[in-house]
Amino acid sequence: MQRFTKDNVCSLVLPLILIAYCGCQKPKHINGEILRNELTANVTEVSINDTMPAKFVQVLNLAKTSGLQFDYGDRHLKTYFEYHCDGSMVLNALSQLGFSKNSALADTKCRPVDPIQFVEMRDAIREEERNQADFFWGIVPGVYDIYECIKTPSRHLVLIEKKNSDKILHLVIS
């Protein structure tokens, strides 16, 4: 029978305490301590067919349109598109999109966004995203009419160039 001495007890107990302590520490993201701004985006090129309903894509003839998708791993995606289409048709098609029956918030029409509000939105975007989606966030607000349309679970921000209303910049947040 082996006798327990101070040395062999310490060599057994200390590793067990260390394992128990490390096992009880939750990663920061589980405790919610990581701020959203600390997350790094996975950026991919996506088809509009993967983001928008088939009816929207078909009505506006956008099947070959692709864009940039930012996935921060927090179950929210931001997808940016640039395409050419009649601006009023885009707003009409967005207004006709369905939304969740249990939605607390949903728009039946697209609402104009004040250019100052757009600048505030731009300033709240992560620098990495703002730089990669510069075609959207780098615009001069007075050159575009800006609209927002909430169709839960998605939010749309649509920029229509004033000079020729067929250049559309479209952000889908889902």
Image (cartoon, rainbow, N blue to C red):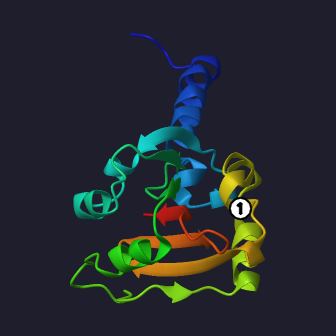
Of 158 and 8, nearer the camera is 158
Say if residue 113 shows up in the picture: yes
Residue 151 locus on image (x, y percent)? 36, 77
Residue ranking furthest to the top: 1
Disc 1 secondary structure class: helix
Q: Nearer the viewer, residue 34 or 128?
A: 128
Q: Nearer the viewer, residue 6 or 153?
A: 153
Residue at position x 70%, y 77% from top?
Answer: 118
**Which residue in the protein does label 1 denote?**
137
In this rendering, the answer to whether 145 lies above or below 128 is: below
Quarter occupied by the C terminus: bottom left
Residue 65: % across, % down: 43, 46
- Image position, residue 11 (x, y; %): 60, 20
- Is residue 155 shown left or right of residue 41? left
Q: Nearer the viewer, residue 50 or 63?
A: 63
Q: Quadrant of the N terminus?
A: top left
> Residue type at mark 1?
Trp
Q: Residues within 10 Å of mark 1 (few under 14, many from 20)?
A: some
For the image, the number of numbered tags is 1
Name the image quarter holding residue 51.
bottom left
User: In this orientation, does residue 152 appear?
Assistant: no
Q: Does 74 sit left or right of 162 as displayed?
A: left
Q: Name the outermost residue toward the front.
A: 164
Residue pictured at 50% horizontal, 47% vertical: 67
Q: Residue 63 in the image: state x and y as whole percent.
A: 33, 47
Q: Residue at x 53, y 33 (%)?
A: 19
Residue 30 sits above or below residue 93 on the image: above
Which residue is found at the position 39% from the left and 74% from the top?
89
Answer above or below: position of 170 versus 5: below
